[in-house]
């Protein structure tokens, strides 16, 4: 079984400040980890992924995430938040042998205030 | 990047009628597509996995006779909500895997269904 936890329903940051959206996972095997963003009444957009290799992965719109195997975490970060980053963020995990059938976290609403 | 088109974006129907939602991969072939349901302020609930040319695989608790899924070609999967009732009102989203299959999903824009 695989699972994802996003411990924060809501994250609020001021524009220009760094942001972190937390994600921890549980999976038996090698994980594929993903972050997606969803704007209101829209589908999800892929931001970044970790498959293998460098633990720090960079993605779209200046976002990055660090894979930490010992802590089973994959936190999403951005050095300087923008108001336009305000959205719903989902972390997802899948086993490398079952690529595509991802398990999603409950989502974290990020609000960036001017 | 891979583009997935979902249609219609919004649909309102009367109770008892059926509604079809289409999910198309525009610039790639998708052997596997997924259908989700999303309630307000909640995560995605995987409903079924749709494989081209074969029957869909439904998740536990999802009524396959209620939610008919057809994946007749490598670029099109459809979800038909049969005999819709108000409790079927929701946001339905499809996603697709590309042939490279490194796991990331490409999502449609979603379809908001309201059953009166």
Image: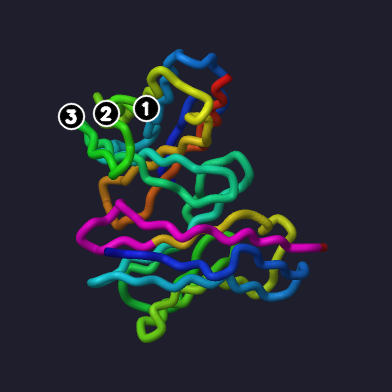
Across and down, in percent, residue B87 comes to: 50, 30
Name the residue carrying label 2: B71
Please state if B61 lies on the left or on the right of A76 as rendered: left
The answer for which chain carries disc 1 is: B
| Label 1 Cα crowd, 10 Å radius (few <14 / some 14-19 / many 20+) | many
Q: Residue at x 30, y 28 (%)?
A: B69
Q: Which of marks 1 and 2 is in front?
A: 1
Residue named by callout 3: B53
Contact (CB < 8 A) between labels 2 and 3?
A: yes
Alpha-carbon distance for marks 3 and 1?
Answer: 15 Å
Is residue A51 depicted above or below B25 in this figure? below
Q: Is residue B99 magenta?
A: no
Q: Position of residue A24 (x, y in %)?
A: 44, 73
- Asked if B102 appears above or below B2 in the picture, the reply is below
Q: What stretch is highlighted in magenta?
A: A93-113
Q: Is mark 3 on a helix, strand or loop?
A: loop
Say which quarter of the image contains residue A110.
Answer: bottom right
Q: Do labels 3 and 1 share a chain?
A: yes
Which quadrant is home to the C terminus of chain B?
A: top right
In the picture, measured across the screen, residue B62 lies left or right of residue B113, that is left
Q: Which residue is denoted by mark 1 in the rendering?
A: B79
Same chain, marks 2 and 3? Answer: yes
Judge from the rendering whether residue B4 lies leftward or rightward of residue A98; answer left or right. Answer: right
């Amino acid at each position: 079984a695989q699972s994802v936890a996003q411990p924060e329903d809501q994250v609020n940051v001021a524009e220009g400040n760094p942001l972190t959206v937390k994600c921890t996972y549980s999976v038996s095997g090698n994980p594929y980890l993903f972050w997606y963003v969803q704007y209101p009444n829209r589908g999800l957009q892929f931001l970044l992924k970790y498959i293998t290799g460098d633990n720090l992965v960079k993605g779209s719109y200046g976002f990055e995430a660090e894979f930490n195997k010992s802590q089973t975490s994959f936190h999403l970060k951005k050095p300087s938040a923008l108001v336009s980053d305000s959205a719903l963020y989902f972390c997802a995990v899948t086993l490398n042998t079952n690529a595509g059938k991802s398990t999603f976290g409950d989502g974290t609403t990020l609000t960036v205030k001017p | 990047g891979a583009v997935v088109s979902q249609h219609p974006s919004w649909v309102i129907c009367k109770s008892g009628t059926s509604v079809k939602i289409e999910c198309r991969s525009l610039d790639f072939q998708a052997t596997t597509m997924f259908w989700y349901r999303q309630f307000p302020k909640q995560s995605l609930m995987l409903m079924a996995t749709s494989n081209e040319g074969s029957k869909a695989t439904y998740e536990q608790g999802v009524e396959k006779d209620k939610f008919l899924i057809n994946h007749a070609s490598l670029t099109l999967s459809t979800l038909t909500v049969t005999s819709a009732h108000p409790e079927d009102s929701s946001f339905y989203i499809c996603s697709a895997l590309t042939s490279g299959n490194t796991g990331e999903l490409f999502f449609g824009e979603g379809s908001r269904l309201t059953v009166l």
